[in-house]
């Protein structure tokens, strides 16, 4: 979903870059970035919808307080994206509504 | 069962926690420093070991002061455990914490909660829209990732951090559409009686004036006495315009990003869960736990220092953390009372100067009423999507406090456990009932203070 909402990156100090996938799209991010930062860099906003009214949301506080950055990370739902550092090959997906009682399958994502 | 024992366990590796660890280790106390972040520094010195921006001028020298504190953690008596989230504290000074390695119990003779501050919730119509985030969030992204908000960018709010992040983003080459200052008319006058105290800390006052000058010289559009702030969405539900009232007119600006700020408030989640005594601070419009001069709370052996004990800033937090460590060293017979007092003198002097400027800043930057008790249509509880109007209706139907409204509408029962709505819910109820906030009280916070999986709980007993 290309859009104009990507957070641009200024010139940074030397660091390793790692590749992660955000909703299936590969993106290079800086080692030490959080999964929530990766989502903002990729412009994947809204990054979740609420369990109550399916309202669109995106990372808000970036310090573990607000729980607006809940994501599905490597198949685990409801993970705080701002508290999770990226790892090479990490699979990051939007959190749609409430988490599932059973592990997420591809069919769930289509629905 | 996983369990370790120390002289002093510290929760939070910000300025207060790091300074306390350094001082306690110097007195040969065994220290464990637990922090939920992957690297030390707290939010103020976030990513200080490896700041993302190449150019040190962007964040400025006050930020790089944190390098000294972090360096001093490298001490044989300090066990620093990053990525460790504390979710409970038992009566016998045992902490329960989770980390990627599993769950642990940590026992210590003395406990210091140095959990810092969080940004005050800033409810206004549209504050939940994707594209709206806090000034603190933008600063974290800048420090740790070198990421800056998508543009057009508007900043709105009140307080020193609003000016600081605007200046930092400008230095980073980010175009700022406008800064909307929501400080109400008359606050300058309210702050004036507190000016003598502020003059005791001239460097900080000078720094604030410097930021204002920097933004003015940069030619950034600034609106004063802004009211009726509103974030407007496009058809995809994303922020695309900011609407506000200023200079007797309603304005609309295009925006991909809106950064908001109304000051910071103590993170009281653990101190509340412990049932410690808290008081309402009228000037700061928030609660803080009650401590004595050495940071000890109403529960013997449990200390709180830094912004989690009451907002006074990073420099004050460093001094307050030092004082706690000296008192702990006295209680554990490493120092006599005379030695403690002798060593505490420089910290006490600096602390007094840092605290002297607060009443001036607190009066000047007290949030406008509309952010403390917002209009009916505004969502107050972001997790359970409860509006101010619904809360007022519950008051009219007989709810007297936040624990009753919680039972009726689940406000405060979502994953953030009331962190983003607690203050507002109490203030909305108090205003509707026409009673002081401390008569209404706060949510009953219970442990675990972070959402926990059954696996994490079970792991304690492996």
Image: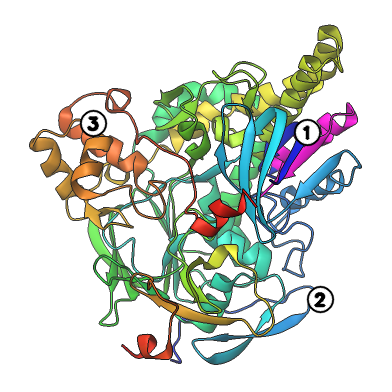
> In the rendered image, is residue B18 in sight?
no
> In the rendered image, is residue B117 in sight?
yes
Report whether mark 1 lies on the same chain as mark 2. Answer: no
Q: Chain of mark 2?
A: A
Image quadrant in which you'd find residue B334: top right
Q: Are marks 1 and 2 in contact (CB under 8 Å)?
A: no
Q: Is residue B265 placed above or below A32 in the rendered structure?
A: above
Q: Is residue B433 placed above or below B369 in the rendered structure?
A: above
Q: Is residue A28 placed above or below A9 in the rendered structure?
A: below
Please tell me which residue is depicted at 86% across the width and 48% down the height of the picture: B71
Q: Which residue is farthest left? A: B397
List the residue tagged with mark 1: B6
Q: Mark 1 against mark 3, which lies toward the viewer?
A: 1
Q: Mark 1 against mark 2, which lies toward the viewer?
A: 1
Q: Is residue A69 left or right of residue B303?
A: left
Q: CA distance from mark 2 to mark 3?
A: 52 Å
List the residue tagged with mark 2: A14
User: Which stretch is magenta?
Assistant: B15-35
List the residue tagged with mark 3: B430
Q: Earlier in the sequence, mark 1 or mark 3?
A: 1
Quick one: SS at disc 2? loop
Check disc 2: other Cα within 10 Å, few if <14, some if 14-19, many if 20+.
few
Report whether mark 1 lies on the same chain as mark 3. Answer: yes
Q: Are marks 2 and 3 in contact (CB under 8 Å)?
A: no
Quick one: SS at disc 3? helix
């Amino acid at each position: 979903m290309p859009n104009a909402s990507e957070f641009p990156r200024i010139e940074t100090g030397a660091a390793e870059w790692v590749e992660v996938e955000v909703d299936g799209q590969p993106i290079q991010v800086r080692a030490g970035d959080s999964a929530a930062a990766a989502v903002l860099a990729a412009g994947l906003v809204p990054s979740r919808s609420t369990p109550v009214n399916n309202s669109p949301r995106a990372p808000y506080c970036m310090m573990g307080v607000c729980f607006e950055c809940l994501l599905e990370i490597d198949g685990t739902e409801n993970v705080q994206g701002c508290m999770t550092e990226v790892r090479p090959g990490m699979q990051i997906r939007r959190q749609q509504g409430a988490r599932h009682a059973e592990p997420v399958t591809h069919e769930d994502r289509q629905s | 069962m996983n369990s370790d024992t120390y002289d002093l366990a510290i929760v939070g590796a910000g300025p207060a926690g790091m300074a306390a660890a350094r001082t306690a280790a110097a007195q040969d106390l065994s220290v464990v420093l637990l922090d939920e972040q992957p690297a030390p520094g707290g939010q103020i010195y976030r990513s200080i070991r490896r700041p993302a921006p190449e150019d040190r001028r962007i964040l400025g020298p006050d930020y790089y002061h944190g390098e000294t504190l972090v360096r001093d953690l490298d001490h044989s008596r300090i066990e620093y455990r990053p990525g460790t989230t504390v979710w409970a504290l038992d009566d016998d000074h045992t902490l329960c914490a989770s980390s990627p390695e599993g769950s642990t119990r940590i026992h210590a003779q003395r406990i210091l909660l140095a959990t810092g501050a969080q940004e005050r919730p800033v409810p206004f119509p549209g504050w939940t829209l994707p594209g709206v985030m806090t000034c603190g969030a933008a600063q974290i992204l800048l420090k740790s990732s070198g990421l800056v908000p998508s543009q057009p960018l508007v900043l709105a709010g009140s307080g020193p951090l609003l000016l600081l992040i605007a200046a930092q983003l400008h230095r980073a080459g980010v175009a700022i559409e406008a800064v909307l200052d929501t400080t109400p008319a008359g606050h300058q006058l309210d702050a004036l009686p507190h000016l003598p105290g502020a003059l005791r800390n001239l460097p900080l006052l000078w720094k604030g004036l410097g930021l204002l000058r920097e933004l003015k010289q940069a030619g950034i559009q600034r609106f004063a006495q802004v009211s009726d702030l509103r974030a407007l969405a496009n058809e995809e539900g994303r922020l695309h315009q900011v609407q506000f009232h200023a200079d007797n007119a309603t304005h609309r600006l295009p925006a991909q990003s809106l950064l908001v700020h109304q000051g910071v408030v103590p993170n009281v989640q653990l101190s509340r869960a412990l049932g410690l005594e808290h008081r309402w601070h009228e000037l700061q419009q928030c609660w803080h736990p009650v401590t004595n001069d050495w940071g000890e709370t109403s529960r013997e052996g449990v200390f709180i220092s830094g912004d989690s004990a009451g907002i006074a800033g990073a420099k004050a937090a460093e001094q307050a953390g030092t004082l706690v460590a000296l008192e702990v060293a006295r209680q554990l017979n490493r120092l006599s009372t005379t030695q403690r007092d002798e060593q505490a003198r420089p910290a006490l002097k600096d602390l007094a100067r840092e605290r002297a400027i607060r009443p001036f800043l607190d009066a000047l930057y007290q949030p406008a009423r509309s952010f403390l008790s917002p209009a009916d249509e505004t969502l107050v509880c972001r997790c359970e999507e409860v509006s101010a109007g619904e809360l007022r209706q519950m008051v009219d139907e007989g709810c007297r406090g936040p624990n009753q409204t919680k039972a009726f509408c689940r406000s405060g029962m979502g994953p953030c456990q009331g962190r983003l709505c607690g203050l507002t819910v109490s203030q909305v109820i108090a205003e509707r009932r026409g009673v002081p906030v401390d008569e209404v009280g706060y949510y009953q916070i219970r442990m675990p203070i972070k959402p926990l999986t059954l696996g994490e709980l079970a792991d304690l007993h492996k």
